[in-house]
Amino acid sequence: MHQRRPGLSPGTSLILPGNVVDYVVAFDDFASAISVPAPSLMASPLIGLPLPPAGWSPRDFAPELIWHPMAWLPERLKRPLTNGDDVEPDNGWVLRVGLELQESGLYDQVSGSWFDVLTHLGIDPANADDAHRLSSWLAGGPDRRLDEFDLDELIFVEDAPEWSLEAAISSLEPLEVVARTKAARQLLAMCNETLTGDGVEPAEQAEMVGMMLTLGVWATCGDEALGARIEQVRERLDAYAGGLSDAGSPVFALSAIFADMVDAGEPIENDLLAQFERVRRQTGLSEFAAS
């Protein structure tokens, strides 16, 4: 039996994760474990974990995370695809990776756990000999099994080699709208809670607003117009000297942006999820419990 390690909360889909705060925690944990600055990671509301920097190989990862499937992404999943001058959108790449990891069972939605690649390779870091073997390999030494292992041994579908690309192309646009709406709905509630200011210290208010600005840009799924509006609020806040819950606070403008995002997506959210469900059935994907 292959060992699995804890990941996200049990029942959490890797695709369209349901809770913004849980995502922040998962992002921070992953960024800390991977030992790279957070801006170097690829974050998207379409998937419950950030992706490592494009092109990374297992030797780029912190030893403590070398068991994770993200450390062993095959070449076709390590970076956005290119075709001449055309480059796959970042969210398309993110969605492709998420689909492959969840559909293959490397990430298990029921338990929220991850497949342990090192156990699959017969390596136990708690064993002194295995730990030395792994340390030597990470330092550049040869190891036939580690050198030759390809995650596609576990996830590549020979009968449908481009299934995840086809699914991502078909479902990217509707899922971006759904992800934007889901995130904005939660951010709007957080924003309104901050504006009331009940029992919240000014320093804590400022920290929450800073987090909402960052998450707001993340939640736009790359929509430049929405991102620009949020950055304008950030600039206004930098020059604002009043209380964050005062009538003239720029936080009201941030709340209005999140409300606009919700209003734009809610009327079509269920239809778009149904559209993804049709893509799921056509592609043979398992059912996602996108909460």
Image (cartoon, helix red, strand yellow):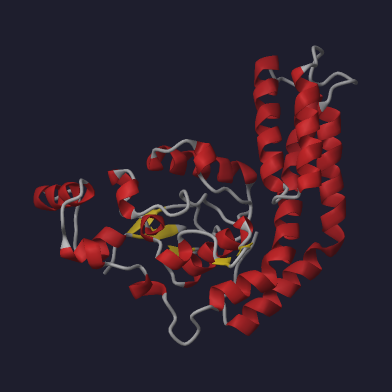
In the displayed structure image, the side of residue 182 where residue 129 appears, left or right: left
Residue 176: image x %, image y %? 71, 59
Residue 16 can be seen in this image:
no
Q: Kindly identify the residue that appears in the image at 57 percent across and 48 percent down.
A: 43
With respect to residue 229, does 248 lie above or below? above
**Which residue occupies the extreme top position in the image?**
241
With respect to residue 136, does 168 lie above or below? below
Residue 20 can be seen in this image:
yes
Quadrant location, the N terminus: bottom left
Residue 241: image x %, image y %? 79, 12
In the displayed structure image, the side of residue 272 where residue 56 appears, left or right: left
Q: Kindly identify the residue that appears in the image at 84 percent across and 64 percent down.
A: 268
**Which residue occupies the extreme left position in the image?**
129
- Residue 230 or residue 67, whichever sits in front: 230
With respect to residue 245, does 258 lie above or below? below
In the displayed structure image, the side of residue 67 where residue 236 appears, left or right: right
Q: Kindly identify the residue that appears in the image at 66 percent across and 44 percent down.
A: 218
- Residue 21 or residue 264, whichever sits in front: 264
With respect to residue 78, does 284 lie above or below? below
Quadrant location, the C terminus: bottom right
Query: How many dots with numbers?
Result: 0
Quadrant in which residue 39 is drawn: top right
**Which residue occupies the extreme right position in the image?**
247
